[in-house]
Image (cartoon, rainbow, N blue to C red):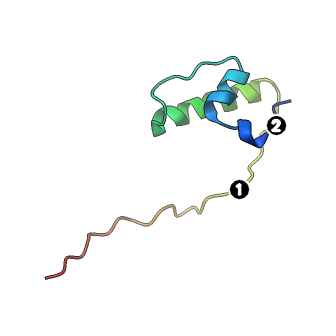
Amino acid sequence: LYQVPRNQTKLTIMLEKLGMNYDGRPHSGLDDSKNIARIAVRIMHAGQLMTVSSLAPLEGAPAPQMPRYRN
């Protein structure tokens, strides 16, 4: 039902195919995340099963380190 060609997986195209508008500023991490969540909710409300296709490590990214300066 929601399968589209790989070249049409842009966020704006997914929203357009669902009859939705982009909310927020393009390429804002927070706004992109909110729009992706809206897409997921719409798909689940339509009865489509969503499955995990890959996993990120639970520990996440390493903590930032102080830069080392040369004398």
Looking at the picture, how far across and down is residue 59, in whole percent? 52, 64
Report the disc number at residue 49. Answer: 2
Identity of the residue drawn at 54% across and 36% down: 33
Looking at the picture, how far across and down is residue 11, in whole percent? 62, 33
- 62 lies above or below 23: below
The residue to which callout 1 is attached is: 54
**Are there few (<14), some (14-19), or many (20+) residues within 10 Å of tag 1?**
few
Residue 64 left/right relative to 13: left
- Residue type, mark 2 in image: Leu
Name the image quarter holding residue 67.
bottom left
Q: Secondary structure at mark 1?
A: loop
Estimate the spatial distance between the alpha carbons at disc 1 and disc 2, rounded to whole Å: 16 Å
Q: Are marks 1 and 2 in contact (CB under 8 Å)?
A: no
User: Which mark lies nearer to you, 1 or 2?
Assistant: 1
Residue at the extreme right: 1
**Are there few (<14), some (14-19), or many (20+) residues within 10 Å of tag 2?**
few
The residue closer to the viewer here, 3 or 45, is: 3
Report the disc number at residue 36. Answer: none
Image quarter in which the C terminus is found: bottom left
- 67 lies above or below 20: below
Identity of the residue drawn at 57% across and 61% down: 58
The residue closer to the viewer here, 31 or 51, is: 31
Identity of the residue drawn at 35% across and 65% down: 64
